[in-house]
Image (cartoon, grey):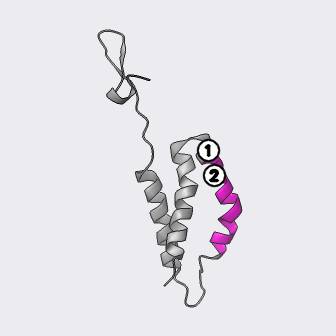
Amino acid sequence: MGASGLVFGYFGYLLVRGLVDRRPVDIVVSIGVALSYGYVMWNSIGFGAAGISWQGHVSGFVGGVVAALVFRDRRHKPAADPGSGTVTLPPGLAGQ
């Protein structure tokens, strides 16, 4: 047993996080990870190689993608009061 499923999960998380959060730093990290490790990770999946579980690698990658979607930073939209024409901010954003 190796930790390759965990490595592929983290790889998938870093790739998708930049796309989901849409922050410049995360996008740059995502592109950097894709360019640096994409080819190596694709070749290390082990399709057709005896004794290497490609299902574990793919499952780890899918788990990382799902984690990036589940744990993304959700943006809060200001709630508009239709009667007054003013915008009411959520409690955590009122002092900013």
Q: Is residue 82 magenta?
A: no
Stretch of the chain drawn in magenta? 27-43
Where is residue 33 shown, x and y percent of the image? 65, 58
What residue is pinned by disc 2?
Answer: 29
72 w.r.t. 76: above or below? below
Where is residue 39 shown, x and y percent of the image? 69, 68
Using the image as rendered, state which of residue 58 and residue 64 is in the foreground: 64
Q: Residue at left 50%, top 73%?
A: 5
96 w.r.t. 16: above or below? above
Q: CA distance from mark 2 to mark 1?
A: 6 Å
12 w.r.t. 86: above or below? below
Using the image as rendered, state which of residue 19 and residue 1 is in the foreground: 1
Q: Are marks 2 and 1 in contact (CB under 8 Å)?
A: yes
Image-quadrant location for residue 82: top left
Q: Main secondary structure of the magenta part?
A: helix
Q: Residues within 10 Å of mark 2 (few under 14, many from 20)?
A: some
**Dot 1: element:** helix
What residue is pinned by disc 1?
Answer: 25
88 w.r.t. 21: above or below? above
